[in-house]
Structure formats: C-alpha cells, structure tokens
C-alpha cells in the first residue's frame, strides 16, 4: 500500500524490450536503500525491484498488461518518474490509501497558473465508470491530490509550488497521458450502489 506522497524523482536511464515486457532502468538516490523484491510505485504503478546496480540505479519489469493500461510504455530515456516506496506499517498516512493499481489513463487538457499555484485539468474515458468527487481524493501519476472541480469525465487539481518542483508535474504539458487511480473508498461505494440498483 502507498500514500501518494512522492519521495523522489527518478530518471529513466535505459529501456530494454524483453519479449512483451519492458525492462526499466531507474536512476534515483533511493536505489541504495532498496532491496530486490521490494515494491516501489513508479508514476503510481506498483512494480517490483528485480536488480540493483550500486547505490544509484535499479531495474524493474513492466509486463504487457501494465504497458497497455498505464503511461509507462510511452516514457523515453531521460524522462522523470514519481517514486514512492510502500508505506511502513505504523507510519503516517499523509496522503490517502493508494494501491498502486492504475485504473485508467487520463489526458492533461489544460494547465493554468493561478496566484502562485497551478490548476491542472484532466479528462478520462467515462465508459470505465470511474468517478471523481469534489474535495475527494485522486492519484495522478502516483501523487495524492484533492479534486477541486469535478464534472463527468473531467476534473481539476491544484498544485502548490512544493509539489510542482518535486514531482513530474513540472514536466507535464497539454496532451500528456497520466496514470489515474481513483479513490479506493469511492470505488467500493460505487460498486455497492451499482449492486443495490440491480
């Protein structure tokens, strides 16, 4: 389980194709603290560390399903990635409950600077029946955020300067694909209501 509080920006230094999988080599100051078989969220995608190279670089494998359902397959060498290690038992839950399982891809529709912060607008395919709620939680590229405006298939989030500087938000441009994980509590409520209506 994760919290959506980004610990570090990793840099994708090499991508290797391995049959239908991708081997991603990540440079990060966290590498020296990792262990093989440890779970790390990469732009909100939970991946297992499979190899460590010294204290600066490690490797993870993204399988075909992950590549198809997330933005990881579109990353290029040199791109930055939001990183978060799994939550330690007994630790603070500073963000919200994040599973590291991306629900779907979103598209960055607009970025607007406003009074020292930034408003990002994202759209998503409503056919998958995910929903956002104003003042509810959403995870965008692994970052725990609060929805400030919500309508069908579109939502806004406000990014403060600290988050902007320490996550991949500073590299996002209009049209970019992002990984979305909707609030797990909201998903359960939606499922219960769906069953209730039957």
Image (cartoon, helix red, strand yellow):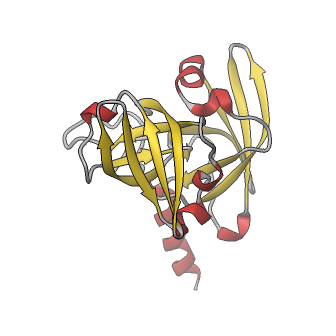
Q: Quadrant of residue 80?
A: top right
Residue 79 falls left or right of residue 31: right
Seen in the picture, residue 196 relative to 67 is either above or below; the reply is: below
Say which residue appears at 60% left-offset and 17% top-offset: 161
User: Which percent across, then down, holds residue 40?
Assistant: 37, 46
Task: Quadrant for the C terminus, please.
Answer: bottom right
User: Which percent across, then down, holds residue 8?
Assistant: 43, 29
Residue 33 falls left or right of residue 133: left
Q: Nearer the viewer, residue 178 or 63?
A: 63
User: Which percent across, then down, holds residue 42?
Assistant: 47, 45
Q: Nearer the viewer, residue 46 or 4?
A: 46
Q: Quadrant of residue 118?
A: top right
Q: Residue furthest top?
A: 116
Residue 113 falls left or right of residue 34: right
Say which residue appears at 69% left-offset and 34% top-offset: 172
Seen in the picture, residue 175 relative to 153 is either above or below; the reply is: above
Is residue 88 in sight in this rendering? yes
Q: Residue furthest left?
A: 90
Say which residue appears at 33% left-offset and 37% top-offset: 93
Is residue 144 in sight in this rendering? no
Say which residue appears at 54% left-offset and 69% top-offset: 20
Q: How many marks?
A: 0
User: Which percent across, then down, holds residue 51?
Assistant: 31, 49
Q: Quadrant of residue 175?
A: top right
């Amino acid at each position: 389980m994760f919290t959506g509080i980004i610990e570090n920006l990793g840099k994708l230094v090499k991508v290797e194709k391995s049959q239908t999988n991708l081997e991603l080599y990540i440079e990060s100051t966290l590498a020296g603290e990792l262990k093989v078989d440890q779970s790390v969220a990469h732009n909100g995608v939970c991946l297992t560390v499979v190899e460590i190279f010294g204290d600066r670089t490690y490797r993870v494998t993204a399988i075909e399903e992950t590549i198809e359902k997330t933005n990881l397959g579109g990353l290029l060498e040199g791109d930055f990635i939001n990183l978060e290690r799994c939550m330690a038992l007994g630790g603070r839950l500073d963000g919200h409950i994040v599973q590291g399982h991306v629900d779907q891809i979103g598209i960055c529709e607009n970025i607007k600077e406003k009074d020292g912060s930034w408003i990002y607008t994202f759209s998503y395919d409503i056919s998958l029946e995910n929903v956002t709620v104003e003042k509810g939680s959403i995870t965008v590229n692994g970052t725990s955020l609060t929805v400030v405006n919500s309508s069908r298939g579109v939502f806004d989030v406000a990014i403060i300067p600290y988050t902007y500087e320490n996550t991949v938000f500073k590299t996002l441009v209009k049209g970019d694909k992002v990984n979305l994980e909707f609030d797990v509590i909201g998903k359960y409520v939606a499922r219960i209501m769906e069953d209730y209506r039957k």
